[in-house]
């Protein structure tokens, strides 16, 4: 253990002193926020230019009811479609509404001079649908129909509270649960690849520089491999703790700017019973109250961040052992593609299962894949925001037990592979190395 500790300390010190560690530690939170929010912001960015559409209404019902919105303007024309086609119109398109559109709603055609978009098509179809439905309602001759429709509109605000084992009801935020499930599941996936590849590249580099041949004269290959895995694990945990501290500081500052004391007091006392309440200049609705109560619950935060640390470390150790075995079996990074395939398939599969588990966290697919060690680090993180799942500790035991078994197998490959040069091994040859006697 003393030799493993020395090797781990060397790996840790070498990496945390690099400029790349400092840069990635600073830029990773920014990059992650950008990945999450920039696409959504870009989707909301629209051009100020409005699309003009000429309407040919053969039914006489729809044309007059179409109104301009933020992206489309409508101009009704008495000319036929063929006549308009002959003209040199500098418009986006021509909308032709069939004579029997009330009974045949599919008899609507949009002819465009440039590529159309889903937003434009949805805006047009929604307007036409509303106009046709209004015309059909008029046939029933109901007095004050518009007033009746306005009066019967009843927005429902659902308050969701989750009961714990003692019967105590606590606020539950589905939006927050889904967001955390996605974020932490994806972080596990990303970190396992990032730091696992770091182990593999370190092994390949030292092997190509003949450093291994000198080091194994003093330590066993198994000790060397364990030292590298644990050293890089310490780097990963250090980086993660820095990010957690950064999130706490930024969150505290943001909460203070938003009037944190008033918001927390309102959420904890349940003062916001109306659909919206103004406090400190901030609109506080029921969803916001539920979110504040959830993120201020120490048990909830402990379950999320504690579970992330357990599964991140376990998932990293398991996959790092496999990446180290791959690195010891090849001479350069180009030869790792085929050997990495069996490692990457379970992680990719876990991402697909994660999408299903976000909708059904206690469904059979989520339950089984959260117990399988090769997929549990990602899938279990999706289930944790919804409560501590049954079988959680069994999943943890299986994960770490599989890690120990994988270290033993990887050590067998490592022992032979560090001295193999000039040959790209197959999976069959790796199995033979495992069966070699010590």
Image (cartoon, grey):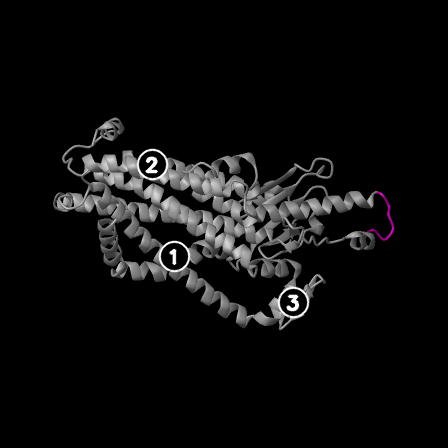
x and y, in percent, of residue 390 in the image = 55, 41
Cα separation, mark 3 vs mark 1, equals 32 Å
Membership of 104 in magenta stretch:
no
SS under mark 2: helix
x and y, in percent, of residue 382 in the image = 50, 45
Instruction: Give the crowd class for mark 2: few <14, some 14-19, many >=20 residues within 10 Å.
Output: few
x and y, in percent, of residue 193 in the image = 34, 45
Which residue is disc 2 drawn over?
A: 405
Q: From the viewer's side, name the closer residue of 125 and 284.
A: 284
Reply above or below: 323 against 250: above
Membership of 141 in magenta stretch:
yes
Which residue is disc 3 drawn over?
A: 266
Q: Could you tell which of marks 3 and 1 lies nearer the N-terminus?
A: 1
Mark 3 and mark 1 residues within 8 Å of each other at the beta carbon? no
- Region of the chain picked out in magenta, as a range: 140-145
Reply above or below: 292 against 350: below
Mark 2 and mark 1 residues within 8 Å of each other at the beta carbon? no
- On residue 240, the disc is 1
Q: From the viewer's side, name the closer residue of 251 and 13.
A: 13
């Amino acid at each position: 253990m003393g030799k493993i500790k020395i090797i781990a300390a060397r790996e840790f010190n070498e990496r945390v002193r690099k400029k790349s560690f400092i840069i990635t530690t600073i830029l990773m939170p920014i990059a992650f926020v950008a990945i999450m929010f920039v696409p959504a912001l870009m989707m909301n960015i629209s051009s100020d230019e409005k699309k003009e559409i000429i309407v040919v209404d053969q039914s006489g019902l729809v044309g007059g009811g179409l109104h301009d919105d933020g992206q489309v303007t409508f101009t009704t024309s008495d000319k036929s479609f063929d006549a308009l086609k002959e003209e040199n119109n500098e418009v986006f398109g021509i909308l032709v509404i069939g004579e029997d559109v009330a009974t045949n709603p599919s008899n609507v055609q949009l002819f465009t001079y440039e590529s159309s978009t889903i937003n434009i098509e949805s805006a047009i179809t929604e307007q036409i649908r509303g106009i046709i439905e209004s015309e059909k309602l008029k046939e029933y001759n109901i007095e004050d129909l518009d007033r009746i429709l306005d009066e019967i509109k009843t927005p429902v605000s659902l308050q969701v509270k989750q009961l714990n084992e003692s019967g105590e009801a606590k606020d539950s935020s589905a939006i927050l649960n889904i967001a955390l499930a996605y974020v932490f599941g994806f972080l596990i996936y990303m970190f396992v690849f990032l730091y696992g590849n770091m182990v593999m590249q370190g092994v390949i580099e030292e092997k190509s520089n003949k450093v291994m041949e000198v080091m194994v004269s003093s330590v066993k290959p198994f000790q060397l491999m364990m030292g590298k895995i644990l050293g890089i694990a310490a780097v990963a945990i250090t980086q993660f703790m820095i990010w957690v501290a950064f999130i706490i500081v930024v969150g505290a500052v943001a909460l203070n700017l938003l009037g944190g004391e008033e918001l927390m007091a309102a959420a904890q006392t349940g003062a916001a019973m109306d659909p919206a309440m103004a406090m400190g200049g901030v609109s506080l609705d029921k969803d916001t109250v539920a979110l504040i109560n959830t993120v201020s619950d120490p048990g909830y935060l402990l379950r999320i961040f504690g579970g992330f640390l357990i599964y991140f470390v376990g998932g990293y150790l398991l996959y790092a052992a496999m990446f180290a075995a791959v690195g010891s079996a090849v001479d350069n990074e180009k030869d790792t593609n085929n050997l990495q395939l069996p490692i990457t398939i379970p992680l990719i599969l876990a991402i697909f299962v994660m999408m299903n588990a976000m909708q059904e966290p206690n469904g059979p697919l989520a339950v089984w894949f959260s117990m399988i060690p090769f997929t549990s680090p990602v899938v279990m993180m999706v289930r944790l925001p919804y409560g501590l799942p049954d079988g959680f500790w069994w999943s943890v035991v299986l994960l770490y037990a599989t890690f120990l078994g994988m270290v033993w197998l990887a050590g067998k490959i490592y022992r032979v592979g560090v001295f193999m040069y000039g040959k790209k091994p197959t999976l069959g040859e790796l199995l033979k190395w495992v069966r070699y006697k010590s």
